[in-house]
Image (cartoon, rainbow, N blue to C red):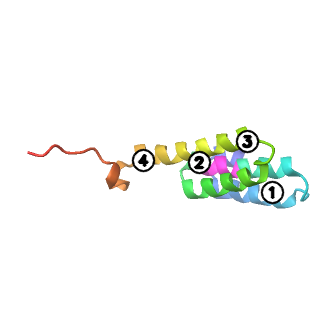
């Protein structure tokens, strides 16, 4: 998370991937923390596709025992996309404000 806070998104994501790899296969909590951290890092920085991928992996991992966690990451995915639309309305022409006809 420190790398993420310093704006080093790629390094943070790589660290989370490495930590996920190092947890024992049965350590669901450890793996879920690494997946969530990677998703959160991407969501804060803006690459929502990468955030969505990590959050979907998280949801698959914890879905059978943490439905509220799954709801939470789906909400974060939606918030990431909405944040991007607010920052760059030109990137999504279908959501641009309508211009009244003259």
Q: Quadrant of residue 22?
A: bottom right
Q: Residues within 10 Å of mark 3 (few under 14, many from 20)?
A: few
Residue 38 is a magenta residue: yes
Between the residue at mark 1 and the residue at mark 2, the CA separation in whole angstroms equals 18 Å
Q: Earlier in the sequence, mark 3 or mark 2?
A: 2
Which residue is depicted at the point 56% across and 49% down?
A: 45
Per the image, the residue denoted by label 1 is 20
Rendered location of residue 77, percent (x, y): 58, 47
Between the residue at mark 3 and the residue at mark 1, the CA separation in whole angstroms equals 21 Å
Q: Earlier in the sequence, mark 1 or mark 2?
A: 1
Rendered location of residue 100, percent (x, y): 16, 43
Q: In the image, which is nearer the foreground, mark 4 or mark 3? A: 3
Between the residue at mark 3 and the residue at mark 2, the CA separation in whole angstroms equals 20 Å
Per the image, the residue denoted by label 4 is 85
Q: Quadrant of residue 76?
A: top right
Magenta segment, principal secondary structure?
helix
Q: In the image, which is nearer the foreground, mark 3 or mark 2? A: 3
Which numbered dot is residue 43?
Answer: 2
């Amino acid at each position: 998370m420190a790398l993420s806070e310093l704006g080093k998104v790629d390094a943070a994501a790589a660290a989370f991937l490495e930590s996920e790899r190092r947890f024992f296969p049965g350590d669901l909590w450890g793996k879920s923390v690494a997946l969530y951290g990677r998703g959160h890092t991407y969501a804060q920085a803006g690459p929502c596709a990468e955030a969505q991928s990590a959050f979907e992996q998280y949801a698959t991992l914890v879905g059978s025992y943490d439905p509220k966690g799954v709801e939470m990451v789906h909400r974060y995915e939606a918030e990431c996309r909405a944040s991007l639309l607010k920052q760059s309305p030109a990137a999504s022409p279908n959501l641009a404000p309508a211009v009244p006809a003259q």
